Amino acid sequence: MAAFATRLAGKALGDFFKVASGAVSDSAKRATADYLLGQRGASGLLGKMAQYPETISNLAGAAAPIAAAGGIAAGASLLGIGGRQQDSSGGRAPSFATQAYTPGSMPFTNEQMGESLLDQQRFQHQLQLIQARKAAGTRAGSLQNFGGVSDIMSLGQQIYG
């Protein structure tokens, strides 16, 4: 567990987890041993476990830090701490895509405005394509009957005029 924490969060946090996991482990061992010593003579599974308090308490001590880390991770997940967040809860700013495009003037987010601008650009390109097809259909800009300078001038006027 300590190596995992060191890799993810750095040495200081790793050292903290080493100390904390040792304390959790020792506490779980003592509590388990004390409980099992009080259950000597009980029947069933608890009675069997009470016959071997040292072994059972060592197992509980080894499992306690893992269970604590899992509990912390589950609690953090439920509270939305850490990882990616979709909104500003938890003190983080919202992502760029979900921020208002121009605060107060348009009811769009940056993502919606980007999609709108892209749709507008697609529309403009479609219009240009239609205009180019019409120009090709009327043979404006074609090089047929290319003769002299006057033809070049009239060709330029057809294309740009």
Image (spheres, rainbow, N blue to C red):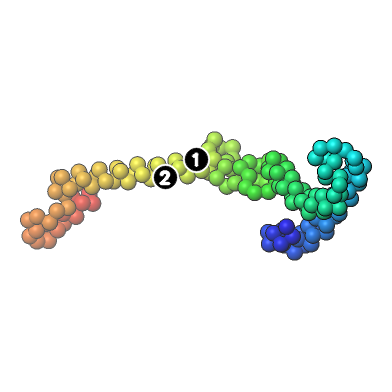
**Which residue corresponds to the image point at 15% horizontal and 45% vertical from the top-left?**
137
The x, y position of residue 132, in whole percent, is 23, 47
The x, y position of residue 144, in whole percent, is 9, 55
| Along the viewing direction, whichever of 86 and 133 lies nearer the viewer | 86
**Which residue corresponds to the image point at 55% horizontal and 45% vertical from the top-left?**
97
- For the N terminus, the image quarter is bottom right
Inspect the image, locate mark 1, and give the three-letter code of the amino acid beneath it: Gln
Toward which corner of the image does residue 143 lie, by quadrant?
Answer: bottom left
Inspect the image, locate mark 2, and give the three-letter code of the amino acid beneath it: Leu
Can residue 57 be seen at all in this image of the molecule?
Answer: no
Q: Is residue 146 left or right of residue 131?
A: left
Residue for badge 2: 118
Toward which corner of the image does residue 101 lie, by quadrant?
Answer: top right
- The mark found on residue 45 in the picture is none
Would you call the spot at circle 1 few (<14 residues within 10 Å), some (14-19), or many (20 or more)?
some
Can residue 152 be seen at all in this image of the molecule?
Answer: yes
Mark 1 or mark 2: name the one nearer the start of the chain: 1
| Along the viewing direction, whichever of 123 and 158 lies nearer the viewer | 123
When the figure is inspected, residue 19 is found, relative to residue 158, above or below; the finding is below
Residue for badge 1: 112
